[in-house]
Image (cartoon, rainbow, N blue to C red):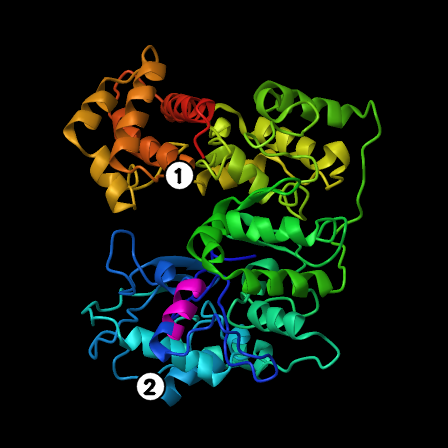
Amino acid sequence: MKKKVTKTAFLSCAAASVVLGLASVPVRADQAPDLIERGKYLTAMGDCQACHTASGGTPFAGGLYMNTPFGKISTPNITPDKDTGIGNYTDEQFIRVFHAGVGKDGEYLYPVMPFPWYTKVTDADVLAIKAYLFSLPPVSAPRKPLEIGFPFNIRTALAAWDAAFLREGRFKPDPAKSDEVNRGAYIVEGLEHCGECHDSRNMLGAGAISKPLQGGEIDHWYAPNITSDKAEGIGKYSDAQLFQYLKTGSAPGIGVVVGPMAQTMHESLGKLTDDDLHDIVYYLKSTPPKEGYKETEPAPGNTTLAANGESYLNYCASCHGQDGKGLGQAVPNLAGNGSVASGGPETVMRVILGGALAQGTYSPMPAIGARMTDQEVADATNYVRAAWGNGAPATAGAGLAGEIRKNTQTIMAMNLPGGCAKIADASMSKVISAPDVQAILQKTNDQNVLENAEQLIQKVKSGVPNAKQADIINSLTLGYCPVVAANTSLATQAQKSEMLDEFSERVYTQLSSKGQD
């Protein structure tokens, strides 16, 4: 539903957080009564760890830098260390962080900490999170310096921001709505803070109160309209489609999660109970429809559409089809895809430029934009957003494509600043780092990739028998990335990206042909 490009500056429970203790909604039997376990559930579902963990760092010890309208802000240590963490916070101080955006010593917090939403969360839920965090081993990790210039480095100036944009107050259930809708509202509007990404924002990072959940650009991604509007929003999808999308990251007719939403799904939404997901769906489907633009379908023979279509046909149609319907459960549809038809073109452009790893039964998406000019990226984007009834405005241009290209670093594009990423799953990493697997990877090239892919798959299946298809593909892709990076015969990023694309596609083909799920 949201997140995560703007991660919070203190305690980012940024994805779907299961919120307990709502007085008017009965506590369900599946909600653990133990305070620490309850807090662990809230914290995990809120994805606090992702925001408060630097790349390769200790969980919850902070150190992750985030881009904000104020500058670069580092996330703090939220382990119970008394010198560098939150070990000295009282209950009252911890609650004040959530409800008023004020820290332990009375300092104003930057609004990347989403206290404008958290102010609606009950004290009981906030203290459950505190109980879990205080149960963790303390880690000594001083906060990295903030990279913020004048006047934003003057904390007292943030009082004016609070006065202008903060509306303190706990969530109040609507007596005219069902318990399920109220619970969904509490999750979405409170600790979940979907509006952190799905609201439009002003230059000071404040959400547009008059346009909740109608979509907005955030850090070169576009979070789509998630009101019940049937043109641009989620109104055209069934409850079952939306539930599946939130639970698994893909659904027929909707497509596949990408970018920050993919991270949210994997680290948070995919861990929610079915009841919580259904309540989110019920609430979002109950919101008033808010159309973000007037849907328009270019007339047949439109020369601009035809010119844009050439880029699509050259680079995209072989997989997504001339009709934009994709290839079943192998390649997602573009026709009727909510992210494609959203109010802004940023997400489409980032996927073209950065590709995507495998998701569920869907194949990896090549970073095809690495082989395209900025104008071709813009043309293909405008085409898919306008064609097949999507009706979105043609607002992509070469300048925007160039800007997004500079801000898109992914594995599939072979341009991550730190090189190739590590394999997160320990068991998978152990198998792929084994000498025999590494020997095969080192010898894999465009002549023997199909044969070697089969051997690699068997090695992984033997070491991790229950591994999912996407996990096998993505882990092998990460394992092959250093081989591609070190290949001196590949002179350009585009060539390296193309080689990695070919490898990941061959692994996918071998797995899917054998019915691996």
Judge left or right: residue 69 versus residue 146.
right
Point out the residue furthest to the front here.
29
- Residue 510 location in percent, x, y? 41, 22
Check residue 117 in the rendering and tell me which mark sits there, or answer none.
Answer: none
The total of numbered circles placed on residues is 2
Q: Is residue 204 magenta?
A: no
Residue at figure coordinates x 15%, y 28% from the top left: 435
Residue reaching furthest to the right: 299
In-front residue for pair 270/492: 270
Which segment did they paint magenta? 38-46
Q: Amino acid at mark 2?
A: Asp
Residue 446: x %, y % from top left:
35, 14
The mark that comes first in sequence, 1 or 2, is 2
| Residue 468, disc | 1
Which dot marks residue 105?
Answer: 2
- Residue 341 vs 325, above or below: the answer is below
The mark lying in front, picked from 1 and 2, is: 1
Q: In the visual, does 378 lie left or right of 516? A: right
Residue 305 pos. (x, y %) = 74, 27
**Residue 333 shown left or right of residue 64 in the figure:** right
Q: In this view of the protein, can residue 415 be seen by the observer?
A: no
Relative height, residue 264 to residue 12 (above, below): above
In this view, the residue farthest toward the top is 447
Label 2: element kind? loop
- Please identify the quadrant where the N terminus is shown: bottom right
Name the main secondary structure of what is drawn in magenta.
helix
Where does residue 382 sit, x and y in percent of width and height?
67, 34
Which residue is at 80% across, 48% downward?
294
